[in-house]
Image (cartoon, grey):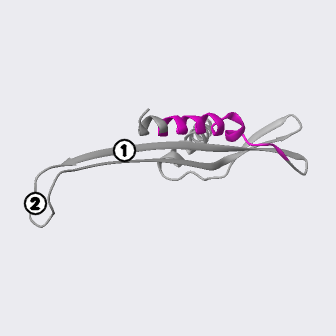
Amino acid sequence: MNKLEEVLDKVTDFLKTEAKTETIIGKEFKLGEFTCVPVISMGVGFGGGSGEGKGNAKGAGEGEGTGVGGAAGLGMGPVGFLVTKGNEIQFVPTRTSKGLSATFEKIPDLLEKFLDKKKN
């Protein structure tokens, strides 16, 4: 087995144990009358490259050369909380939207206001 296959096997094993429902939907806890469940986002990225050189450039030494590199990253962060009280449930985000996504989130409210004004 070559080194790349070993690394991919280790990453796959890690993801099997860490990227599961219990990681994304955290352990519930009580906050007064409320039951809260944290919701977490998880992202994984991989990259790699290789190069090969031949010849003798002035002042660069002599001979042939090869190079290979790779990287992986894992990021996790809170998205919000599912909060329940009695029979009611609500999602409370931990981040506020900015830019274009914030505009799209406001469209339903704007349409409702527009239709209410049109009725009057």
Whether residue 78 appears in magenta in the rendering, the answer is no
Q: Which mark is on residue 57? A: 2
Crowd band around label 2 with a 10 angstrom C-alpha radius: few (<14), some (14–19), many (20+): few
Mark 1 and mark 2 lie on one chain; the one further toward the N terminus is 1
Near-viewer residue (76 or 109): 76
Residue drawn at the location 60% of the way across and 48% of the way down: 76
Q: Quadrant of the N terminus?
A: top left
Q: Quadrant of the C terminus?
A: top right
- Is the stretch drawn in magenta largely helix, strand or loop? helix
Kindly state the secondary structure of the residue where label 2 is placed.
loop
Residues rendered magenta in the picture: 7-29
The answer to which image quadrant residue 40 occupies is top right
The label nearer to you, 1 versus 2, is 2
Callout 2 amino acid: Ala
Residue 28, x across and y down, in percent: 81, 43
Q: Which mark is on residue 56? A: none
Near-viewer residue (90 or 15): 15
Residue 45, x across and y down, in percent: 47, 43
Left or right: residue 102 versus residue 90 is left
Left or right: residue 20 versus residue 53 is right
Q: Which residue is mark 1?
A: 48
Whether residue 28 appears in magenta in the rendering, the answer is yes
Residue 57, x across and y down, in percent: 10, 60
Residue 89, x across and y down, in percent: 79, 37
Residue drawn at the location 10% of the way across and 52% of the way down: 55
Callout 1 amino acid: Gly
